[in-house]
Image: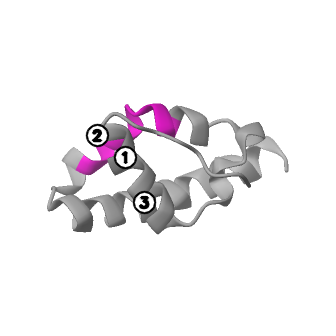
Amino acid sequence: MNERSFETLLYGITANVTQKIMELNDWSEDEAIERFTQSKLYSYLEREETKVWQYSSLMLAQLFNEERSGRLSLPEV
């Protein structure tokens, strides 16, 4: 996948995951975006080679919450 295509994909994934995080945690959009984009999970998501972008939005939101509780374990892709 070329860099431009991946950036477009990342933008869409981030929007969808942010929505799920808002629903799961009863947070505002700003709070969800800020916390998600500062997470270790997001740093993995930003790197195409990790394949984290293949997870569903719900799974990413659940993994984000796992990270918040101190345990982040990525499933095999």
Instruction: Check residue 36 for magenta coloring.
Output: yes
User: Can you identify the residue that label 3 sits on?
Assistant: 17
User: Can you identify the residue that label 1 sits on?
Assistant: 66
- Relative to 27, is 55 on the left or the right? right
Residue 14, compared with residue 46, is above or below; it is below
Amino acid at the residue labelled 3: Val
Secondary element at tag 1: helix
Which residue sits at x=33%, y=65%?
Answer: 19
Rendering coords of residue 28 (x, y %): 16, 56
Mark 3 nearby-residue class (10 Å; few <14, some 14–19, many ≥20): many
Amino acid at the residue labelled 2: Ser
Instruction: From the image, state whether disc 2 or disc 3 is nearer to you.
Output: 2
Q: Earlier in the sequence, mark 2 or mark 3?
A: 3
Which residue sits at x=20%, y=46%?
Answer: 31
Rendering coords of residue 54 (x, y %): 68, 59
Mark 2 nearby-residue class (10 Å; few <14, some 14–19, many ≥20): few
Colour convention of the picture: one colour
Which residue is nearer to you in this view: 21 or 75? Answer: 75
Which residue sits at x=71%, y=40%?
Answer: 50
User: Can you identify the residue that label 2 sits on?
Assistant: 69
Mark 1 vs 2: CB contact within 8 A: yes
Mark 1 nearby-residue class (10 Å; few <14, some 14–19, many ≥20): some
Main SS, magenta residues: helix
Rendering coords of residue 70 (x, y %): 33, 33
Which residue sits at x=30%, y=39%?
Answer: 68
Q: Earlier in the sequence, mark 3 or mark 1?
A: 3
Rendering coords of residue 38 (x, y %): 37, 31
Amino acid at the residue labelled 1: Glu
Q: Which range of residues does the magenta coloring cover?
A: 32-42
Disc 2/disc 3 C-alpha distance (Å): 18 Å
